[in-house]
Image (tube, rainbow, N blue to C red):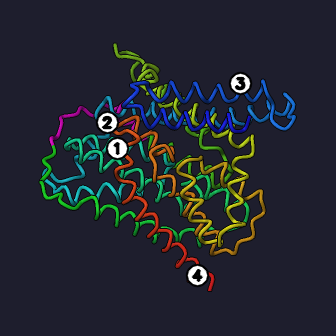
Amino acid sequence: MTILLLLIALAAFLFIALEEVTHINKAKTTLFFGTLAWLILFLSPPHGASSESLNEALGENLMEIASLWLFLMAAMTFVAFLNQKGLIESIIHRCLPKQISERRVTFLVAAFAFVFSSLSDNITATLVSITLVMSLGLPKNRTMRLAVLSVFAVNSGGVSLITGDVTTLMIFLEGKASIDNLLWLSIPSFCSVLLLASLLSIGSNNIVVLQRKNVEYDKTGLGIAALFLCTILATILLNLIAGVPPVLTFLFGLSVMFLLGQILYRDEKRESLLDYVRLIEYDTLLFFLGILLLVGMLKDIGVLDQMVKIYDLLPTELANYFLGLLSALVDNVPLTAALLKAGIMMNPAQWLSLTYAVGVGGSLLVIGSAAGIVAMSKVNGLSFFRYMKYSFLLLLCYSVGYVGSLLMGQWLYS
């Protein structure tokens, strides 16, 4: 039965990779295989597991998915409104010169995605960064490069802050790393992002002429833009101060957005802000649902626990490196949870390198991180195989960043 479930997971990943060949939306196939796997689990419980324990495991899995879904819905509704009004594009273009070289644009996108992901969650940072990339009107191949760069930069930017990446928060809460030492991870992380930007900008000698649009800044649009920024800041502060889940703060911000639109649009014949919920890419949400159901199944049958046994075979530093590579195939959150529960003995420097590995390693495949999945849903033509064309460069930059995290750990704890 375990082999059958592994084959189902493999089939799901193959259908994602072959989407352009089969012409079947990846959301449909992942949802099918994700639900099928759990049906098989209930019909033929592994190791004599009871239906009650399976119900509990499925409930935990669905709770995690529901939190992600609701958070995505809130963030994407904000972005949908601001995009429809042209506010994000207009603000970005006003901050940039009318003419700018493609090489300079590459480094600006890298820096923006890195910094913004340090201040907000990865999903919001990806949505805004991809909006910036799409607004530049570059050729398709250049847009692809900047989208890949954005994914890597977003994942790299979050590893040094407990508010930027869930795995960083998990490792911190277990007392494996301190906040001040985690902040030092931003140095090797940013260096690896700059390296990728340099490699991707080779041959980018053209000049980009930004076409500025005349956007009417009505009080509602500006008010909601300010509310979006305040919601992001409040998410960070409330999580740090009182441990408030980000999804709760974002849902509150969304409710304020709806009420603000009701008050300011009361006497005008305009669409309700609730209508912007319909502009969300629900295929992205269904794709997330299918992927996380599959990962939850792998966790329940003990596959993730087996992966942790790599530490019995390899030196800790090398095992951490390969665990980062595994996070490109399996969600890094349950992978990190399995590692923490296994009681692997590591010194603080090694925990620091692991934090980098599981936070950035998912960038190697487009399905390896939430940032990659969001980017794939927003950028036309960004498929599994097209993203894989950059895997060697991503692996090189990940490896450089990982070596930098090792050196940083040795320096901090020497």
How many numbered tags mark residues here?
4
The residue that mark 1 highlights is 386
Alpha carbons under labels 2 and 3: distance apart? 33 Å
Circles 4 and 1: CB distance less than 8 Å? no
> SS for tag 2?
loop
Task: Of the two numbered discs 4 and 1 on the same chain, state the one appearing first in sequence.
Answer: 1
Alpha carbons under labels 4 and 3: distance apart? 48 Å
Task: Of the two numbered discs 2 and 3 on the same chain, state the one appearing first in sequence.
Answer: 3
**Quadrant including the N terminus:** top right
Q: Which of 26 and 370 lies nearest the eye of the viewer?
A: 26
Alpha carbons under labels 2 and 4: distance apart? 42 Å
Is residue 393 a member of the stretch shown in magenta?
no
The residue that mark 4 highlights is 410
Q: Nearer the viewer, mark 4 or mark 3?
A: 3
Q: Who's the residue at 56% across and 83% down the image?
A: 411
> SS for tag 1?
helix
Asked whether, in this view, residue 30 is left or right of residue 339, the answer is left
Asked whether, in this view, residue 107 is left or right of residue 169, the answer is left
Q: Nearer the viewer, mark 2 or mark 4?
A: 2
Q: Percent from the top left, x then y, of residue 77?
A: 45, 30
Alpha carbons under labels 4 and 1: distance apart? 37 Å
Which residues make up the magenta segment?
A: 211-226
Alpha carbons under labels 2 and 1: distance apart? 8 Å
Task: Of the two numbered discs 4 and 3 on the same chain, state the one appearing first in sequence.
Answer: 3
The residue that mark 3 highlights is 39
Alpha carbons under labels 1 and 3: distance apart? 33 Å
Name above or below for residue 85 compared with residue 411.
Answer: above
Task: Of the two numbered discs 2 and 1 on the same chain, state the one appearing first in sequence.
Answer: 2
